[in-house]
Amino acid sequence: MDFHAIAQRAIGDMPPETRFRPEDAEVIRAHRDLILPLAEEYVTSFYDVLFAHEPTRAVFEEGERPEREATQVDFFRRIVEGPHDDEFFAWLAFVGPVHVVRQVSNPMMLAMLDYMVLYVMKKFRGHENADAVTEAFVRLAATLGAIISYGYEVAWQEALQNVVGMPPALVQRMVHEEAQRMFPLRSHGAASYPHPADGAPPRGRPVAWPVYFFSIHSASGGKATRSSAVKRVVRNAVHSRSESARPSAS
Ligand code: HEM
């Protein structure tokens, strides 16, 4: 994976107004004496939140918390101190796949980026530069989220390509075509959107394997492992003529 390219693509997809910019880095650095002492308390509360919620607690192994806290403190210091250069953003693209391996879902990740913003916002309430600091953290979190989630997406695609042994362009085309079939859009001539109460959209032909793979991941809340997904893909191939063997589209 080319982590520099992933980071640049993610940033490039963000409208400039939403990106973390040098002025934001300046604002954060200018308040470093107030922000840095928050690191330990912030990280303790961050993991209190994760450990109080069963799906996020389940990610962690026995006795792992101190090491995770130390990493997160370093990470927080790094985002305050900078430098916010290409290396930093490329490293964030690597943080995405790290979370794929540990089965941390993007909803978990994005929610905790919001938690970081809310934490800083509350701490700066009443401060004369509260708005500027909060805005800087909002754009920082948006940029971290864009890069990490895009790194996550690319890691999934590459793992999938390895599993099914298909070239990337073919996988992407198949996924796109299957998505168009599964979710017909009014803007593309569909009469109306199916109502959720109507159940799954009609199936004209077997679900393409890549979409099946992704649907296993989503249906399991990101819990399905690569090997369990592969097993199910193989099982479905064996029973490909049986409607009941196909995954639910809901
Ligand atoms: C604000 C959102 C988050 C950020 C910025 C973040 C950042 C990071 C970073 C920088 C690392 C170290 C990567 C490295 O080894 O270089 C890491 C590792 C890890 N994170 Fe997160 N993380 C976030 C959310 C989460 C959540 C929500 C979970 C779990 C529910 C989680 C679980 C883990 C685990 C288990 C590791 C260790 C990976 C390993 O085994 O090496 N993270 N994270």
Image (cartoon, rainbow, N blue to C red):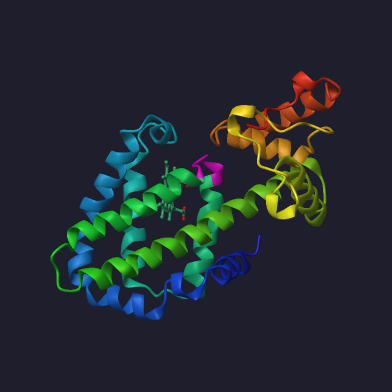
Q: Magenta span: helix, strand or loop, mainly?
A: loop
Q: Position of residue 239 (x, y in %)?
A: 83, 21
Given residues 245 and 169, the one toward you in this image is 245
Residue at 56% of width from left, 43% of height from top? 101
Depth order, front residue of 122/100: 122
The residue located at (77%, 43%) in the rendering is 181
**Residue under the image location 30 percent in, 46 percent down:** 46
Quadrant of the image containing the C terminus = top right
Region in magenta:
100-105
Identify whether 85 is placed above or below 169: below
Placement of 135 over or under 244, stated as above or below: below
Residue under the image location 33 percent in, 35 percent down: 51
Residue 12 horizontal side relative to residue 64, left or right: right
Identify the residue at the far left of this view.
126
Q: Is residue 158 left or right of residue 173?
A: left
Residue at the far front: name it. 191
